[in-house]
Image: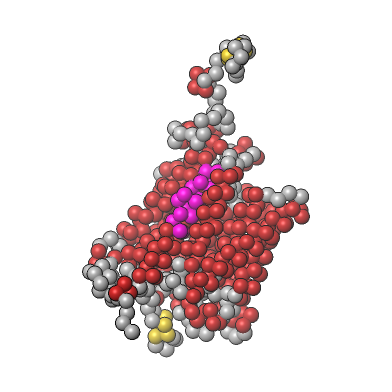
Amino acid sequence: MSVPVAYQGNTSAAVADWLNKGDNAWQMTAATLVGLQSVPGLVILYGGIVKKKWAVNSAFMALYAFAAVWLCWVTWAYNMSFGDKLLPLWGKAKPALGHKFLLKQAEIPASTHYYRTGDVETAMATPYYPMATMVYFQCVFAAITLILIAGSLLGRMNIRAWMAFVPLWLTFSYTISAFSIWGGGFLFQWGVMDYSGGYVIHLSSGVAGFTAAYWVGPRSTKDRERFPPNNLLLMLVGAGLLWMGWAGFNGGDPYAANTDSSLAVLNTNICAATSLLVWTCLDVIFFKKPSVIGAVQGMITGLVCITPGAGLVQGWAAIAMGVLSGSLPWFTMMVVHKRSSLLQKVDDTLGVFHTHAVAGFLGGATTGLFAEPTLCSLFLPVTNSRGAFYGSPGGVQFLKQIVGALFVIGWNVVVTSIICLVIRTAIPLRMPDEELVVGDDAVHGEEAYALWGDGEAYETTKHGWSDDTQYADGRINRSSAA
């Protein structure tokens, strides 16, 4: 049978023999779904979940990070993460801008996996779409990582310091984790499993956010004591985009529209739903009320937990991971946090340490337990990979997962601290007190809502009131509106 023209190569100069149109279409769709998790997803989630006077600043921190990562990514950071090997944990920096580079078949040069003898075990990853698609897909992952870090710093970080922090952390932290685990670095070669970013994105952002929060310092005392969300419905819209966008987050990582991609998407939803329900039940049992914010936190911990094993575990394991991700991070946030002087001292605004660092570590560890051998063979470069529940050498895999997590934690604590210390030599990390009192109007000269309150001094001329306020029925109130 002849191949239909639509599925043939070389039908035009833009359709090479190696191009799989279905894979390319899915990969760009998956990348766009992940991008939508950030813009507008986390932009409006952050804007809605914080106190009204910080809505603009919080949303803008996310928007700025998304834009800044893009320029850094194509200029130098992509090849530091997925290019030719410079060091066992770092790729060579170079641009990803020329058409000769972007239109050739995608490849991850350092991803060839070798036996100890030096023989090739698994050939280099060469997806059937152009490098431009790969650069796009990996960029939105880098961007959301920085935006997640911002969640720990909302309500007090100097916006100029944040503008400096983003490119520095991307360059000296994200690229290290990405190359080491995904790009062919030493943890990749060793066989550490991270299907879609439980370590590279979530563990690193949770640890880096907590570390940066330590150096930046806390919000104002008033804000720490009372920080009510200004728009829960808007927060839920952002949360919904985050959940649905995770289909691209986990479904795009096989680098193809294949059976493993389908399984990853299904497991993602199973784990997220289970985790949300478990968190909500715990809120009802111990606090007598189901919390909407708690439900969103449970959803996020479920999504994070399944990420390192989305296409590597069976459906029953996704449920088990959901039960764990809905309970253990709940316990660290609701119980451990209140009893720990360190956790109390560090002002992690949105609890990113619990929802991403704890859940990411949990996901990586449970992947080391539940990774099914047949599913591992569909994705992983190391043959005979399996979780501890499936016999030898699964126990070794579990230990590899723990060591990989410890590397990510240690690197992020040290490098994030150095970056913050360097920045504060030139720019204060924390806003001045007068800006902390007022909020958005002082920082940006803009406000989210045309309403008075929350940090703003009352001015009769500005807010349209006078001492002689006239009602609709003609009565005049002679009392002072102030």
Magenta highlight on residue 219: no
Residue 94 point in image, percent of width and height: 30, 63
Residue 330 vs residue 342, the one in the foreground: 330
Residue 140 point in image, percent of width and height: 42, 58
Main SS, magenta region, reads helix
User: Which residue is drawn at the image coordinates 39% and 85% (left, top)?
Assistant: 120
User: Which residue is drawn at the image coordinates 57% and 79% (left, top)?
Assistant: 372
User: Which residue is drawn at the image coordinates 48% and 63% (left, top)?
Assistant: 249
User: Which residue is drawn at the image coordinates 45% and 51% (left, top)?
Assistant: 39
Can residue 270 be seen in this snapshot?
yes
Q: Quadrant of residue 74?
A: bottom left
Up the image or down, 481 lies above or below 176; here it is: above
Considering every residue shown, the one lying at the far left of the view is 13
Residue 140 vs residue 431, the one in the foreground: 140
Q: Quadrant of the N terminus?
A: bottom left
Q: Quadrant of residue 352?
A: bottom right
Residue 411 point in image, percent of width and height: 49, 63
Up the image or down, 136 lies above or below 290; here it is: below
Q: Quadrant of the C terminus?
A: top right
Residue 24 point in image, percent of width and height: 37, 68
Up the image or down, 39 lies above or below 454; here it is: below
Along the horizontal axis of the image, is 21 left or right of 275?
left
Can residue 211 be seen in this snapshot?
no
Start and end of the magenta stretch? 33-48
Up the image or down, 53 lies above or below 28; here it is: above
